[in-house]
Amino acid sequence: MRGEFVDVGGGRLYYYAAGTRGAGDPVVFLHGFPSSSRLWHGVIRDFPPGHRLVVVDLPGYGRSDPGVGDGSCTGLADTVRALLEDLRIPRATLVGHGLGGGVAQAVAVADPARVAHLALIDSAAFGLPPRGLARLARALGPAARLMPPGLLAGLVQGSVRRGFADADRHRLTIDTWLQPFTTARGRDLLAAHLRLLGRCDTGSVTPRLAGLGIPTAILWGADDPWYPSAIAERLARLVPGARLEIVAGAGHFLPEDAPERVLAALTTLVRTD
């Protein structure tokens, strides 16, 4: 896997490429809060050949610069579309988790001809903020930026741990995600991310998926504490022909809790006409 930076919207966006080029459409992976492109390692490792895989760090996460776009789902979607233009990808399967799922929806609504398939995994939808995190953001308010470096990340860590079926098994992963937010600059960035989670403007986006005709898979952890599985069922009723799979014993971070289930669902999806 090789990583590269692309200048998009006045900042650098990081992505890495994997897979093998072939007859299949490229597959673009979009992570959610507070993860990064590392979220997908267990999924892409055994992805079927014939697909170029593009795994992105959204602005302000992983290695990508902050401040690219306005942080809304539609703003981030514009950034992703600009990346696809730069990479000369006219059409792709979009796979989005959490916030990244909201971004994938916004790309599909803005430019449906560009989206071959859509996979929404424990996704932001219908304008609903993530439970727990939204309460934390409201409780902290502007005080979040006044906390000692590392304290805010420590508070967020509790909510993140609840998003895993077995947080102790993924302790290193959680630490890796949150470590960039333990400096003074990182604290300010994390506070901004928390505020922006409420701006994932899917309320006006999600309902428009119904008329797009894009083959769609909806995958959800049954024990997701941020976006309950009732959202998945609502999405499945909205999108004609959508494949719904709710995974027992998994939480919000389904690509970490059960990567093999995500891989199996995506393998089926990319073979769907």
Image (tube, rainbow, N blue to C red):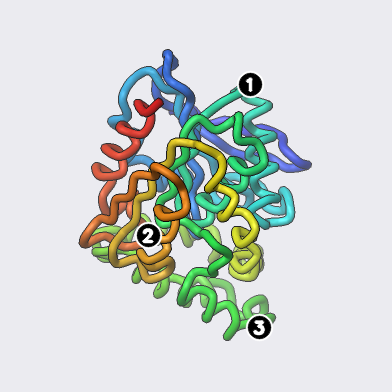
Q: Nearer the viewer, residue 264 or 176?
A: 264
Does 155 appear above or below 14?
A: below
Q: Position of residue 205 (x, y in %)?
A: 62, 54
Q: Is residue 186 left or right of residue 178?
A: right
Mark 2 vs mark 3, CA separation in Å:
37 Å
Mark sitting on residue 254 = none
Identify which residue is drawn at 40% across, 75% down: 158
Q: Which residue has dot 1 on it?
A: 88
| Crowd band around label 2 with a 10 angstrom C-alpha radius: few (<14), some (14–19), many (20+) | some
Secondary-structure class at tag 1: loop
Crowding at dot 3, Cα within 10 Å, few <14 / some 14-19 / many 20+, comes out as few
Assign the N terminus to one quadrant of the image: top left
Cβ atoms at labels 1 and 2 below 8 Å apart: no
Q: What residue sits right under mark 3 in the picture?
A: 143
Specify the quadrant of the image occupied by residue 250: bottom left
**Relative horizontal placement of residue 45, taking residue 11 as reference (left or right):** left
Q: Nearer the viewer, mark 2 or mark 3?
A: 2
**Residue 58 image offset from top left, x and y in percent:** 58, 47
| Cα–Cα span, label 3 and label 1 | 43 Å
Name the kind of residue labelled 2 in the image: Glu
| Mark sitting earlier along the chain (2/3) | 3
Disc 3, SS = helix
Task: Say which of 153 and 205 sits in front.
Answer: 205
Q: Which image quarter holds the C terminus? A: top left
Observer-nearest of 230 and 139: 230
Tell me the distance, in whole angstroms, between the alpha carbons under discs 1 and 2: 35 Å
Badge 3 amino acid: Ala
Q: Quadrant of residue 175?
A: bottom left
| Residue 233: image tag | 2
Residue farthest top in this picture? 22
Disc nearer the start of the sequence (1/2): 1
